[in-house]
Amino acid sequence: MSKPAGAAPRATIRDVAAQAGVSKSLVSLAFKDPARVSESRLRRIRDAAEELGYQPNFLARSLAAEGSPFIGVVVVDLRNPLFADIADAARAVLDAHGQYGLITSASVPGVAGAGERYGIVDDRVMAMLQDLRPRALMVIGTVADASALPRGIPLVYASAAPEADAGQTSVRVDDRAGMELLFDHLVERGHRRIAFVGGEGGGVSRLRLDAYLEACRTRGLEEIVHPASYGEREGADAGARLLASDPRPTAVIAVNDLAAIGVQAAAEEAGLTLPRDLAVAGFDNTYLAGLPRISLTSVDPRNAEIGRLAAERVLAALEDPDAPGDEELVRPGLVMRASTLG
Amino acid sequence: MSKPAGAAPRATIRDVAAQAGVSKSLVSLAFKDPARVSESRLRRIRDAAEELGYQPNFLARSLAAEGSPFIGVVVVDLRNPLFADIADAARAVLDAHGQYGLITSASVPGVAGAGERYGIVDDRVMAMLQDLRPRALMVIGTVADASALPRGIPLVYASAAPEADAGQTSVRVDDRAGMELLFDHLVERGHRRIAFVGGEGGGVSRLRLDAYLEACRTRGLEEIVHPASYGEREGADAGARLLASDPRPTAVIAVNDLAAIGVQAAAEEAGLTLPRDLAVAGFDNTYLAGLPRISLTSVDPRNAEIGRLAAERVLAALEDPDAPGDEELVRPGLVMRASTLG
DNA sequence: CTGAAAGCGCTTACAG
DNA sequence: CTGAAAGCGCTTACAG
């Protein structure tokens, strides 16, 4: 019984037509534009469809029609909890508008190795998605090479910093606003030597570094940058370097929660007591930041809002595919926790 | 430039045939069974294909042929880091064997609410996957309702406890072995009052509870069970109840890492010093357990191994679709960390 | 080794 | 409002 013997082949439009005593095309029409079919035949068709358990074949429809009634949603990194939150929120909105969002993961297995670029998408997955001919595409996260994405349909990025050749529609958090919230909070608590851990790994990391530098300049604070990418390991390494500097910063802002956790680890390793000796804050407000043992102050990008807005952009693009692209920045919040409050 | 005007339609087999001066079917054959095509024509066809940027249309192929040369990989829960590890490992193996694994996520957006069942898959995603006619299906995680899955093709579960109507092929960790490792470790360190937090939420949770009860019986230890599901919140609630009991357990095993973290939080909330006053251990060895601040002893299910074995099961099923299903249990390891070492 | 033909399940004009 | 016909891009026997 590991596979149902025979796997009763699905009923086709032809079966339904025969059973209802009408032509194939009438069945097709009955599903597509019921108003144009007489009531009696419509009922016969529907009864037949139900009886046979008929469901239109997705492939055949995509092949024959101009495209399929669905939106492709590509999640760049399966591991980032950020993206799942956005995908869920986006799907809910698409659903509510009768659009159907097909979520697919596109990252390629991480070849063990550090220098690897982030956001490599699998060509075959993308080719398949392209063949499926979705009405629009939503990409969650930064892809390393946008040219691998399906073309010719509206494209909306969520939580990604599109490459220079702008004109793309994207929805993401306002990193500068987030950085300002962090600085206001830290400065108010008396910090003057505020370091940044991050800037590497492309996309958002770079934007946050820029925002950090600008915040320092505005306030006349010293710029203290320790390069790192998005991981805990990277955060810990940068943290160790940072702690060796003299005078030591009193506060650290990391490019994301994971890197911030790395900084915390390095500081405790070095014998500091947190947050007394060092305030630490991150970005993304993932659920990690909320774990009691971690309790990390973090910029909340409002992922549900990003997902919602991105979905609305998709819906708008469906209406008017030729509308120019634009970037929408979501105003972040700040969630203060023990890591800076101590 | 938000969408490439016109979106140059992809070259079809017909274009390639014309350019190469052969028939359509010969082009098809050239891709499917090159050995049967003369060398000179083969070269002309390949040159033409390259020049035109021809790529076979996935849909058309699936529709015309018995199925498509790919394996459907369904990840039940996008948020569980466990599953991403398994998916990556599985995909690597499939890739190495020339099979192409299409990963898709099938969980439906969580309608805010507690009582919700875990592992609900989206019917439309499954219908689409079915239409695509993969050669086999790999399901990572426990689905609430297996009847929603595509039928008629080999099915392999990874990290899931299939429903009673067995005969399914599945690869998952040996929970009893994991529990034994945990008990041996804790008993050796002098613990006699060992509680279990979990048992709810279906599937694996139940299996681990059974394993716990058996381990207690074998050793003549008292059974102390505080029901909980997989979340941190649930772990914390159960933890609070557990701490109120008298005499208090000296060690707690939780159904997974997240629940264990909840127990830790509840214990610290109650003023205990960990691990001196309470040893805590979990299952799954997610990266959370490894974070220095958490440092949780955890049963390592060897997810890469599970993914690898599940992929091999898929490959075997491709060879012999009628082989009977069986369950393979992976021998776990134990990663000891501060939460039980004190 | 090659090529004309039929068909996968659907949709879309187009005549009635 | 209805139905026969052509076609989406491919594959699969089947006759040469």
Image: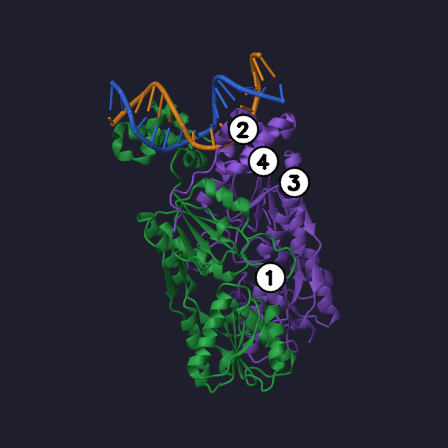
Chain colours: A green, B purple, C blue, D orange
| Mark 2 or 3, nearer chain start | 2
Q: Is residue B313 left or right of residue A45?
A: right
**In the displayed structure, would residue B241 be above or below residue A22?**
below
Vertical side of B258 occupied by A78: above or below: above
Residue tagged by mark 3? B315
Helix, strand or loop at disc 2?
A: helix
Q: Chain of mark 3?
A: B
Q: Amino acid at mark 3?
A: Leu
Residue type at mark 2?
Answer: Ala
Label 2 sits on residue: B20
Q: Which chain is home to disc 2?
A: B
Q: CA distance from mark 1 to mark 2?
A: 62 Å
Residue B149, x across and y down, in percent: 51, 42
Q: Can the viewer see residue B255? A: yes
Q: Which mark lies nearer to you, 2 or 3?
A: 2
Alpha carbon distance from label 3 to label 4: 16 Å
Where residue B57 sits in the image (x, y, percent)? 50, 36
Instruction: Pick whichever of labels 1 and 2 is earlier in the sequence.
Output: 2
3 and 4 marks in contact (CB < 8 Å): no
Mark 4, chain letter?
A
Q: For the point 58% across and 85% down, which residue is it?
A: A248
Q: Residue furthest right?
A: B188
Neighbor class of circle 2 (other Cα within 10 Å; few <14, some 14-19, many 20+) is many
